[in-house]
Image (spheres, rainbow, N blue to C red):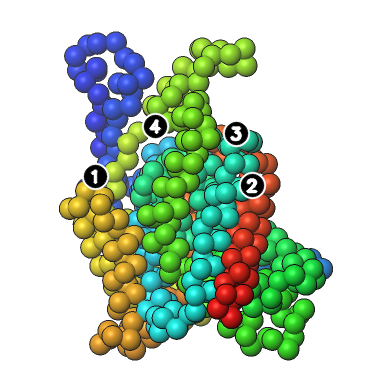
């Protein structure tokens, strides 16, 4: 498929041009387009370089900050796409946005392969472990969302506060709002903040809570399972240091709680917390937020009408870019295999098999979502079938679990966030508008998720022991 552009009918009919006419341009990119190969080269080179650098640990007293390869990937991608000297062309940034929507489903497929083998553990979990998920569900929405509204974060509030925004959140928000939406940029801001500072924030809070002596250590262990492996590990290590005689129980409960949050978080996020956050946001703003899609900001002394028109035209001039699904999947697969080989310090045919299975799951999920007109989200299809493949009732569970483990989970995240970084140049003004606001909002979101979950677990332990 070659690259081509179709413009609106104004050019052919002789009518005067307008922003709407400019918006009608469509660009299709395929492997025969030399421009697409520029994007492919950047994806592979940046993600491979980031994976080769590896993690860097910065000790900070009782805690530490670990800068994983994903940070190098998204940072380098954002610099390439947004630098002023020679920024990445807008159509390639839009193409990266399209590919990103497919990449998050690949990530969900890989995540689902870790769920199946642990289903028996989930069935054995007690009421306290299940109920503590309520804390993770409502903590961020109840406290962080109102704060974000107060700070006027706009529609990005929904994406930044419906959860603590780990990997699966990208797919949930991009499927509901699109990967070019303010809500998606809210997820991205919260993800970057949580990745860099989440572990240190939750470890400090856990240390304070443990020192107060008002929580059962087991309740704190359950609260540690916020849905992030690094945050869970940081919080659990602090709790263990305060109660070394309970190390095994604390670590087991923290890991199980984190697993439950990861499993239930996808389904609850799609059907409960994301719609709830959206409605709560609209209730608090009473649908009068000037930054909501489709609303035009009122002209003020700070932004005259002419400036508003300029902003509107700039947004409308972004071309609509189409990348065939199979092209996106091949780009992700190739980049992912390179990153996985670097992470594993070797290459095997099982890596190819794992990516082929993930590709089939993603294609099937997207197809079913289209057939049902979105009533069955692609992410649910991918996660459910992937979990079944590795569950104890699957005849191929043992073999495929071994195959899936050849793909390092973090290497796929590095590729995904590299693609996200390459799409950020066009969104930098929006991210700058969020700016410092994500610091208090993100801190409250992480703290609320941990503490409210620990409170619920404490009450449940009192009832059931």
Of the pair 348 and 169, the residue shown nearer to us: 169
Closer to the camera, 11 or 259? 259
**Where is mark 1, residue-wise?**
2
Of circles 4 and 2, which is in front? 2
Secondary element under disc 4, as helix, strand or loop, is loop
Residue drawn at (66%, 72%) of the image? 220
Pointer 3 or 4: first along the chain: 3
| Residue at image coords 24%, 31% | 6
Tell me where residue 400 sits by quadrant: bottom left
What numbered label is drawn on residue 318?
4
Question: For residue 402, which quarter of the picture?
Answer: bottom left
The residue labelled by disc 3 is 152
- Say which residue appears at 29% left-offset and 43% top-offset: 322
Examine the rendered structure and indicate whether residue 427 appears above or below residue 107.
Answer: above
Assign a secondary structure to mark 3: loop
Q: Counting residues from the N terminus, which is met first, the one under dot 1 or under dot 2?
A: 1
Give the CA separation, mark 3 to mark 4.
26 Å
Q: Nearer the viewer, mark 4 or mark 1?
A: 4
For discs 1 and 3, the disc positioned in front in the rendered view: 3
Q: Earlier in the sequence, mark 4 or mark 2?
A: 4
Q: Nearer the viewer, mark 3 or mark 4?
A: 3
Disc 4 and disc 2 in contact, CB within 8 angstroms? no
Q: Earlier in the sequence, mark 1 or mark 3?
A: 1
């Amino acid at each position: 498929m070659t690259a081509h552009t179709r413009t609106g009918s104004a050019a052919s009919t002789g009518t005067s041009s307008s922003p709407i006419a400019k918006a009608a341009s469509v660009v299709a990119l395929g492997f025969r387009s030399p421009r697409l190969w520029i994007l492919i080269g950047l994806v592979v080179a940046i993600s491979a370089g980031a994976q080769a650098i590896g993690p860097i640990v910065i000790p900070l007293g009782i805690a530490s900050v670990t800068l994983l390869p994903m940070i190098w990937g998204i940072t380098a991608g954002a610099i390439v796409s947004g630098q002023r000297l020679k920024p990445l062309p807008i159509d390639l940034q839009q193409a990266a946005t399209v590919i990103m929507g497919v990449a998050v489903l690949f990530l969900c497929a890989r995540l689902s392969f870790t769920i199946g083998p642990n289903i028996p553990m989930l069935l054995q979990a007690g009421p306290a472990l299940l109920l503590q998920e309520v804390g993770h569900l409502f903590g961020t929405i109840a406290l962080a969302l109102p704060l974000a509204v107060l700070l006027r974060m706009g529609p990005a509030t929904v994406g930044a506060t419906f959860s603590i925004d780990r990997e699966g959140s990208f797919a949930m928000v991009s499927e509901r709002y699109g990967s070019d939406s303010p809500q998606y940029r809210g997820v991205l801001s919260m993800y970057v903040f949580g990745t860099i500072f989440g572990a240190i924030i939750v470890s400090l809070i856990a240390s304070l809570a443990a020192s107060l002596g008002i929580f059962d250590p087991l309740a704190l262990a359950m609260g540690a399972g916020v849905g992030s492996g690094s945050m869970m590990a940081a919080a659990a290590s602090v709790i263990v240091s305060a109660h070394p005689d309970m190390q095994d129980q604390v670590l087991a409960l923290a890991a199980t709680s984190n697993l439950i949050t990861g499993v239930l978080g996808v389904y609850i996020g799609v059907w409960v917390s994301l719609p709830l956050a959206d409605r709560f946001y609209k209730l608090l703003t009473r649908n009068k937020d000037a930054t909501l899609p489709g609303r035009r900001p009122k002209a003020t002394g700070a932004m005259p009408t002419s400036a508003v028109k300029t902003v509107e035209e700039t947004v409308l001039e972004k071309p609509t870019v189409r990348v065939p699904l199979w092209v996106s999947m091949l780009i992700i697969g190739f980049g992912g295999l390179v990153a996985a080989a670097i992470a594993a310090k070797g290459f095997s045919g099982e890596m190819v098999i794992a990516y082929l299975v993930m590709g089939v799951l993603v294609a099937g999920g997207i197809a079913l979502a289209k057939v049902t007109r979105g009533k069955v989200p692609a992410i649910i299809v991918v996660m459910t079938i992937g979990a079944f493949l590795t569950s104890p009732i699957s005849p191929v569970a043992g073999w495929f679990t071994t195959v899936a483990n050849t793909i390092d989970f973090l290497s796929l995240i590095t590729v995904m966030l590299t693609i996200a970084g390459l799409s950020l140049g066009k969104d930098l003004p929006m991210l700058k508008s969020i700016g410092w606001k994500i610091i208090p909002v993100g801190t409250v979101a992480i703290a609320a998720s941990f503490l409210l979950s620990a409170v619920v677990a404490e009450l449940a332990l009192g009832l059931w022991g």
